[in-house]
Amino acid sequence: NGISNSNSNSKNNPFISQHSFLELRGGASILNKKSTQTKMVSTSTSDSDAAATTTTSPETKTETETAEWKLNAVRSKMAELGIDALIVPTDDPHLSEYVPKAYMRRAYVSGFGGSAGTAVITKDEALLWTDSRYFNEASLQLDADHWTLMKQGLPKVPTLTKYIADKAAEYYTKTKTTYNVCIDPFVHPASFEKDLNGAFNEASDTLDIDIDADAESDDDVPIGKLTTMENGQNIIDDVWGESRPSIPKSPFRVHPIQYSGETISSKVTKLQSQMKEKKATLLVFSALDDIAYLMNVRAKGDVDTCPVGISYAVINSMDNETVLFCDEAKVDSEEVKAHLEEAGVVVRPYDDIISYMEQHLQQKKSKVWIDKTRSNYALSRIIPEKSLIDAQNPITPMKACKNGAEMEGMRLAHVRDGVAMANSIAWLENAIVNEGKSVSEVEVDEVITGHRAEQPEFQEVSFPTIAGVGSNGAIIHYRAMEGSELLKYLTINEPILIDSGGQYSYGTTDVTRTWHFGEAT
């Protein structure tokens, strides 16, 4: 049918599986602007962008820490497997906004540490797509000799799928062979296959292709092909090696009924009722906050500043069971075991989720309800279309409607957090105004966290504190660090933006205030 694998090295390799697609988009011009720090793709450069690109040379790094070494190592493995483009997203298997360090593959390979962005590595290019929140940060952190910043959302900056589609079209035009795009299916959303497929289709429509005699139409010509890494393998992990952090196994703690306001059994009963209405036999949860809510558990340490634990969960109406998939170390405490057993929750190994779903799908009349917007591609692709119910996760509206206990917990969190903030600002005003001191942004962060820690049942901050003096307050997601060139000290001459929050057993806060202890100009 004209579909062939031009990369013989990838044949019969258990490391990858292949899905041939027929897609791509037409070409768009790309304007490359190389700044003093990072190559950027955009149509305009604002004053803030220009300021962000001015920096001193990076500190000396060991060979294996340099951008050049990492990219060479990745490309070597790509060549072995016949891969033309490797996509490295921010996500973990649960599509979390903030991910455990073990899944910070994009940050490792690119050097960019923001919470949003996707890297694409080809044989001769390395590009990073991120949004306007991170233009400054990315321009400072990327190595301009090896990386190009793609400022997504700006005119003439192609989307990631369009860029890949254009590359595939160009490659096919020159070589008459398929462009091989590789992903880890566990860290890409279920929607990615469709998006890439659409991009390939658009691009193929723009090409004048000589159809193979056996092909029925242009649609049988595989301009691009999606390849997935299998068996737990990941190219970036192989390069990262032993220095890659281990996947965390922080223990769950029980989220008490006085704060949750509803038992696991009550929530499961409500969900089973909705499953019956949709004729679903299996309801799958992969978002970590959904699972924490359903199971009335929290964790500390898996994801920095987020009280969730790495896990999956399902409700199975055929076998009448609720299953939590996680590492056994997470449910080691007697309190957590008793809490789950009381609700009839069965605990199975984290990696069993795929085989469990596959076994369920072998049963007659099985219907799997999964929210593809909140699930990874590895889970969604095993569900046949006839057995798929792709609809909003029913926990989403349940979480949005707070019960009395939850609302009281939110109020209590803000009252106690307000005490911590009042104490912190009183200290800061006294130091700046009365004592005439200059206080570093780092010290401001430490003092606020210290006052929060004095409050009952404080767990941790709810996100890294942003304490930005003067112009630093304009840097989105700024984090003060000792030794940084950007570090500033607060006096009566400049304002300070403080964006901070706390995780308490009963609620979460996020408070943003701008203060000026002198006279504004």
Image (cartoon, rainbow, N blue to C red):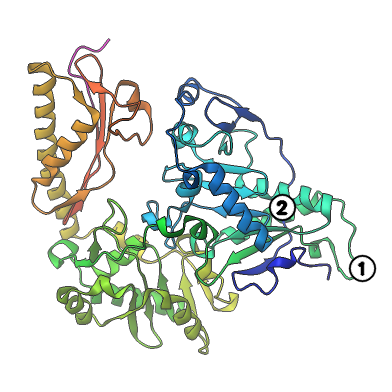
Horizontal and vertical percent position of residue 247: 36, 63
The mark that comes first in sequence, 2 or 1, is: 2
Which residue is more in the foreground, 314 or 466? 466
Mark 1 surroundings: few (<14), some (14-19) or many (≥20) residues within 10 A? few
Horizontal and vertical percent position of residue 167: 72, 48
Q: Is residue 509 left or right of residue 146?
A: left
Identify the residue under disc 2.
Answer: 24
Identify the residue under disc 1.
Answer: 213
Residue at image coords 71%, 66%: 9
Q: Is residue 18 left or right of residue 190?
A: right
Q: Amino acid at mark 2?
A: Leu
Q: Is residue 160 magenta?
A: no
Q: Residue furthest right?
A: 213
CA gap, disc 2 to disc 1?
A: 22 Å
Residue at image coords 49%, 45%: 117
Quadrant position of the C terminus in the picture? top left
Dot 2: element: loop
What span is colored magenta in the figure?
Answer: 514-521
| Quarter of the figure with residue 514 | top left
Quadrant position of the N terminus in the picture? bottom right
Whether residue 188 can be seen here: no
Q: Is residue 515 magenta?
A: yes
Which residue is more in the foreground, 182 or 224? 182
Disc number for residue 341: none
Dot 1: element: loop
Whether residue 132 can be seen here: yes
Mark 2 surroundings: few (<14), some (14-19) or many (≥20) residues within 10 A? many
